[in-house]
Image (cartoon, grey):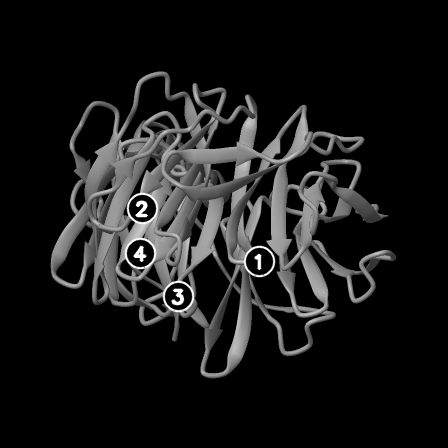
Amino acid sequence: MRNPIIIISLITSAVLIIIFSGCADRELPSGDIYPVQLSFPDDGDTINNSRIYLDWEIYPDANGYRVLLWKEDSLIWDHIEFNSSVKTLFPVADVEYRFCVGVRIGDGDFEHWSDTVTFYVRQTPFRIISWASTPGIARDVAPLGEVIYVADGQAGMTLITRDGDSLSTGTNIDWADQYEARGIFADSAANLLIIADYRGVPPIYFFDISDRLNPTAGISGVWARLCGDVTGFWMRDTFFVAAADRDDGCYIYDYTGEPYVNQRGAPFTPDGFCLGVAARDTLVAVCAADAGIVILDVSDPEDKVQLGRCDTPGEATRALFYRNYLYVADGLAGLGVIDVSDPTNPRYIYQSDFQVGDAQDLAIATVDGTDYLALATGSEGVIFYDLSNPSAPQPVGQLETMYAYGVGSDGNSFYIADRDWGIVLVSHR
C-alpha cells in the first residue's frame, strides 16, 4: 500500500504549483469583474469646492485612466489621466455632478469601469455665479454697474458685461506701444477709466467712459514708466490720480478734463519698491514692498508729506482703507491690519497668514449689512473675511481658482481676476 502522507504531499504540491503559476501567468480579466474603485467623493457627498478633486484606487498595470464627468445630464469633461487622482482645471457651480473612471491596460481600450457616483457642489458662504474668459491674462478688475473693466495684461483692456447672473466677454481694446496692463481704476463721477500699463508708452492710459460700453481713448502725457497700480480720489472738487511706479515711487496727478493731466510735484520715493497705492480724503498709503507702508499727506500735492510709516512682515503689495484701519495684501505674510486712526503713528495690529499663497490684492463688499473682505492670494485663489470685528478680520471661506491676481467689488458682489479663468463673479449665498 502506498504511503498516504506521500500522496497528500504530492497533491498539495501540485495544487500549489497550479495556483502560483496561475497567478504569475494570469491576465487581467475583461468586463467588470475587477472594476476601478472610486475613493472620493463618495456617492451622495456634498462638497464645498470651486474645483473638484477626484480620487480612485491604483489599478494594477494601468496605462492611463479615462475620467468622465457630468454636470447634471451633460458630459462636461472627458479626460485621460495617468495618476490615480485629478483636480478639474475649470470652475464649477452649485449643481449635481456625476463621474466614473475606466482603466486601460497596455494598448487596449478603456474598460473595467467604476460605478458612476453622484455628488453635489455647494459652495458656502461665497459661491461662483458666472465667469467669462478674456483674451489676455486678467490682472485687475474695476466693476462699474453692469460693466466690468479688466486690466488684461498684454491684451490691454477688456470689457465684460453683466446681465443678471451672467457674464459675457465684450470689446477688447489694445493700443500702440501697450505692454502689460496690471492695474485699473474707474470713477463714475469723473467718467474716467485709468490703466496702469507697466512698461507701456504711455505707462498710464486714460479712457473717457461717459458711454460705459464704448470707452474713448484719452491723451496721457504723464510718465511713470514702471506703473503697476493706480487709484483715484476727489479733493476740493478736483479729481486726482495716485500712481505706483516701482522704482520712482508715488506720483500724484490732477485731471481737470481732456486732455489736461498734470503731474503735481515730484514723486515720493519710499525705501522699497512702490507696488501699490490707496487713497482716502487727503491721505495716500504707499505699499513699499519689504519696506512696509508709508502714509502721506497730499493735501498739498505739490509737497507730499510723510506722516508715518509701518513695517509689515511680508511685502506690502496692495492696500485698502476701511474706517480707522488699513488692510494690506502683504505677499507671503497674508493679510495685515494697520490701525491708522492716528496717521502719524500707524500701528500693525493683526495678521492672518494661512502659510499658503501670495496675497496680492483685496476688495470689500457688503451683504445684508455685513462687510466682507476678499483677499486674492495667487495660487490659493481668494480667501474671504468677515469684518464684523474690523481690527481682527475672521476668515469664513475660500474659493480656489487657478491663479487669482486681483479682486474687485461693485459693493455687493466680488469679481476675481484670474490668470486662467478670466473674470469670475462671486456672491454671498
Amino acid on which the number 1 mark rests in the picture: Arg
Q: Residue furthest left?
A: 73
Amino acid on which the number 4 mark rests in the picture: Val
Task: Specify the quadrant that holds the C terminus.
Answer: bottom left
Residue 217 figure quarter: top left
**242 vs 50, nearest the viewer:** 242
User: What is the number of callouts on the image?
Assistant: 4
3 or 1: tag closer to the N-terminus: 1
Secondary structure of the residue carrying numbered label 1: loop
**210 vs 135, nearest the viewer:** 210
Instruction: Find disc 1 in the rendering and name its residue.
Output: 236
> Distance of mark 3 from mark 1, alpha carbons?
30 Å
User: Disc 3, disc 2: CB below 8 Å?
Assistant: no
User: Disc 3, disc 1: CB below 8 Å?
Assistant: no
Circle 2: is it few (<14), some (14-19), or many (20+) Cα within 10 Å?
A: few
> Distance of mark 2 from mark 1, alpha carbons?
47 Å
Instruction: Find disc 3 in the rendering and name its residue.
Output: 413
**Residue at 70% in and 47% down:** 300
**Residue at 21% in and 23% down:** 107
User: Disc 4, disc 2: CB below 8 Å?
Assistant: yes
Single out the mark in the foreground, 3 or 1.
Answer: 1
Instruction: Find disc 2 in the rendering and name its residue.
Output: 90
> Distance of mark 4 from mark 3, alpha carbons?
18 Å
Vertical relation: 227 (above or below) 308: above
Say the numbered circle drawn on residue 92: 4
